[in-house]
Image (tube, coloured by chain):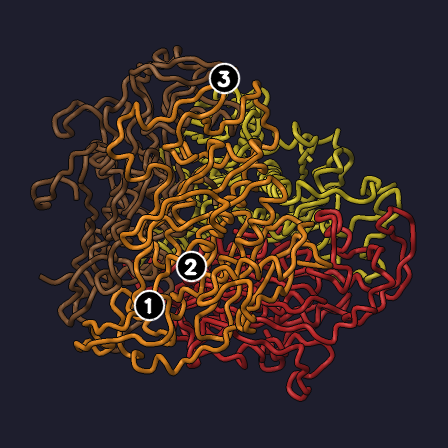
Chain colours: A red, B yellow, C brown, D orange
């Protein structure tokens, strides 16, 4: 598997740099017959657009997705879905001042060390803009999960700097943990937690991943952490919906930590490509907070992993029937 | 790639259940010519053995690794290395009382739901004993990394329940972040953080993974988080040695959170395989704290991922030469 | 994917050398609930045993397969199936005379060039004995295909040297193309022909692979080659049951060409490890004709590929229903 | 690995249908620093263009490749190389007459059976036009192999229908087996033959693959087939440059058999999507002989596989040094 691909059966491959001609991706393995249009993808892409309310803004051409294959007369055909999003309005000149310097906390240093060459404009491959491909692939996964299994994947911003934001209800946010009304699909997905961790940590700027109680588990006693079961369901959800790498049927709860942006205007110490000490200030236009835009990206990655595992599960376990019909393994209140 | 394999070039496949005949693994892709004996692996396996000081205990046969292929006259041949560790002394009868019940917080419920069948003895596939395969594969990776690049992978226990344990020095512990005296290898490994996250979260009982400042990054300002560089090296290491998925050359620092064991003697509410409400007490012999034994396992997983990336890097970037020789990109004091 | 593994969902990993302690393999992805015993595998292994009728011979211990995991109370559990076959009776001393010489037409030269080290005893990794792992994995696939879909995989020896052997009926041979009574499974498997070609060519000694008319296609006209269809079925099967990489529902017909054994007693010119001209005669015990034993191996590989594709197909296309029920797409007459 | 990808380190993913907006691909794993322009790829694409001499024709826009990522200032950066080739001039109306019928010998029947949906225009995914992606990826591989190792990959048309075409010299053809002046690279590539077989058989229309003597091996004696070695080199090349899956250093010789085109004007018997007996004549514009255009496609696939194995070899075996310097293992005469 190449470095820019993930997924076994729902396999996503991405390419593109922030100031090159286009970003693009290939989704291989989507079941045939799913109704799919560019608009289905565009809606999710618009949720991650900087500096705009997604319902009123005039779309700039540079943000429009084009589907190149895998869809015929409005339905997926089962062949690979290729798509691109052109880059325009990129103002490469903004980057001339930092072309030979490394931004503290930014990947331009590591790309240069690894490859001996780098595209100094914008973040190159490490730009937050790379996430357009993940969000597009996630949009397809979300649609299939919803239509096939009634599963919803939702995220919300729980903390901004030191400021914790209390969760009220899904009605109060437009983005928010996944929840399945269909107990037939969720309690099944093996190595699910490891793949979630990979998917989340592969998002640029993510430095931590927790499932369920996460780091809080350290101070819990065994009698406190292990989620008791009753015929009506689970009493708690410290395991975040995953035990032994297999989903339990409860809501799968995942938390991620994002580092602050490295493209800031304050002068900072760094070196240049000749190894000399210099100071750097980043101009260009960048997000003040990547966290605000990260929600649809995290949702997309979780949706892709979930879809991949759902396909793998039905491949291996199509004949499994349980001797007893259990109640839905949900959390009770 | 199958569910029980990981790694692209240093590829580890594992099999075995806690109360079946044996655990075993296949390491495919190890370079030829590495001096390797069963003892090299056994030393690492002994570090994770429950209930014994590893230097004095008589080894029970059940813990002995046997190498079946890939080594000839004391050196690896480049072909697949197969090995097994037999299970003995398993006392399956201890499990009769819980054969039809699910332990709260344990994967026996999810395995049963997914596959419609489970090996009720011990933890089956989800047993902590499955980690013998990872530790064995990690032992080979650690040896190659040390001999080829002078890289050491070390871990330590930083918190036990609510008790934080301050780190004094590597001399004071016998297990401890990886550190490379060779700047040629580390600043190179792409998607490294995502693969670390996968590897750690794939360990049973791990519920959280952090790289560098991790969840602490949330409350850091950009000017505080981004690690400044000087010609002498990095000033701090909030990024934990990874930027944009590529290692920086600093020490790679990873933290993991382990949940408490689910096999406890206190009676707890659960259901049985017929969906009825029952209580459960787990007897059998189990670790009071998985955290104590987790250090060599986490080290092994990090070593395997590091070796895989080192091999992938030299495949793709063998011709890269930097125009300027930079100082070693280490943290300065 | 490592070099010693194949398959996406029914994934087979093999290890072992002909004169090391054991051969072994891991089958990952087998559906749970399949009745499976060591005998099911042993029967297929015995079909490839040299120098014996498989029904009467006393088994030597060295040929006995041991299942180490993935089976509980006689049924597969869905976890990885590990197994080994110990090597005994290996007479390494037979090889002393050729330890530093390369057999013409044998892989000992290429292994030595690639890895700088080789196990001179027997064929090492390139021995025909490596096929025990493939045959064992194929035995499991054949059983599942037969029980789940009624599919049989059969081969026969069609030519021995210049001697063509006419096929009479499956009754007259005990091994023979695969044939499905269930039209629901076969017309579905994409990239099927490429994976068959890989599987067959990966068998040591195979130098050619054909599907359907194969090389005969070159001299056929388009109007002659393309298999006409009627409501009763296909009129011919020049395509060998595969069109555009997808199986048609007809019998899948595959032919392979095996080179003669390279371990022969006639003196031949070669070089030694110091590059000097020498002559070589191979003693040891070897098959006069690998073709005779190749049938169960080819069957096993085809069964593994078929099972992998059947699992992948139901993952992606579980919801496909055709608007029209076609007649069984078999060859008529 | 998804169905539309191949290669472990030099990984090619393709998408596109013959009458959709575009074909495209992603090449992941190309080393950084390779000089690369659209023209390098275009030259190879033009070699496979139907109905034109490649040096004089005005290029129609529909055949022009556009590189979207992975190249900066004329050199590869080590990140994924995405590219597209737009489809224009497709005349979908030509296909109206056959929209509900299946062409004998064509994959439109199998795609429809597998996915329950198909793009009836042109060949859809099974069109010969899909090979533009392979040829583009092969162009990059050929350039790297030539610049890094001096390796050339060349093919020629050896038989057209019953007409055998004798090979005179590489000077007399513009396309022609691969040949390495650098003995350091070739004798090293494991599972090489199986991957070649996969790559060739994955080309639409290919029904047979041979390496070296191929099917001719069946009638050869062991003393005749095994290639003798002298200090000056190999005496013959029946093994086609591959032993035990590892290349020997001789020229690697591969033959493929192509079936005739299934899109012919003669009326033939078939069924329609309702299962009724009908006759079919294919209009539209199609190649009279796919064999003529197949040479650059086969070259491209061999180049991709060779590059993938060269990268994998140097990952695993970078430290291998042979105790004796052997003469170049070429065929003598």
Residue C160 coordinates in the image, percent (x, y)? 19, 33
Numbered disc in front, either 1 or 3: 3
The residue where tag 2 is placed is D293
Disc ID at residue C71: none
Q: Chain of mark 1?
A: D
Q: Are marks 3 and 2 in contact (CB under 8 Å)?
A: no
Mark 1 element type: helix
A126 is higher (above) or lower (below) than B123? below
In this view of the protein, can residue D145 be seen by the observer? yes
Mark 3 element type: loop
Distance (Cα) linking label 1 and label 3: 53 Å
A231 is higher (above) or lower (below) than B79? below
Q: Quadrant of residue D119?
A: bottom left
Mark nearer the N terminus (2 vs 1) = 1
Which corner quadrant holds the C terminus of chain C? bottom left
Residue closer to the observer: B298 or A133: A133
Side of C330 where B102 appears, left or right: right
Q: Looking at the picture, do discs 1 and 3 lie on one chain?
A: no
Residue closer to the observer: D121 or A33: D121
The residue where tag 1 is placed is D111
- Name the residue: 42% across, 45% down: D196
In this view of the protein, can residue B71 be seen by the observer? no
C210 is higher (above) or lower (below) than D213? below
The residue where tag 3 is placed is C273
Distance (Cα) linking label 3 and label 2: 44 Å
Q: Chain of mark 2?
A: D
């Amino acid at each position: 598997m190449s470095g820019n691909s993930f997924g076994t059966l729902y396999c996503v491959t991405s390419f593109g740099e922030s100031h090159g001609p286009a970003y693009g991706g290939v989704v291989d393995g989507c079941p045939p017959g799913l109704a799919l249009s560019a608009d289905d993808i565009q809606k999710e892409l618009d949720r991650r657009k900087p500096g705009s309310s997604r319902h009123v803004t005039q779309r700039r051409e540079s943000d429009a997705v084009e589907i190149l294959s895998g869809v015929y007369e409005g339905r997926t055909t089962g062949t690979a879905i290729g798509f691109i999003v052109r880059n325009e309005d990129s103002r490469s000149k903004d980057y001339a001042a930092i072309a030979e310097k490394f931004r503290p906390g930014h990947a331009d240093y590591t790309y240069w060390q690894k490859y001996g060459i780098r595209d100094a404009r914008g973040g190159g491959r490490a730009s937050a803009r790379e996430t357009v491909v993940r969000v597009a692939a996630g949009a397809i996964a979300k649609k299939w999960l919803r239509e096939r299994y009634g599963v919803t994947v939702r995220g919300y911003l729980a903390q901004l700097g030191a400021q914790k934001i209390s969760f009220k209800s899904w009605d109060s946010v437009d983005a928010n943990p996944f929840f399945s009304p269909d107990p037939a699909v969720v309690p099944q997905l093996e190595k699910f937690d490891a793949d979630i961790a990979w998917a989340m940590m592969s998002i640029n700027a993510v430095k931590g991943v927790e499932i369920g109680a996460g780091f809080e588990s350290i101070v819990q006693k065994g009698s406190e952490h292990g989620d008791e079961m009753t015929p009506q369901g689970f009493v708690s959800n410290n395991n975040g919906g995953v035990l032994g790498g297999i989903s339990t049927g409860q809501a799968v709860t995942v938390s991620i930590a994002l580092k602050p942006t490295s493209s800031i205007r304050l002068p900072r110490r760094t070196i240049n490509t000749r190894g000399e000490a210099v100071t750097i200030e980043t101009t260009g236009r960048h997000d003040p907070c990547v966290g605000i835009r990260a929600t649809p990206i995290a949702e997309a990655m979780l949706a892709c992993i979930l879809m991949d595992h759902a396909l793998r599960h039905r491949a291996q376990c199509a004949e499994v029937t349980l001797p007893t019909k259990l109640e839905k393994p949900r959390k009770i209140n």
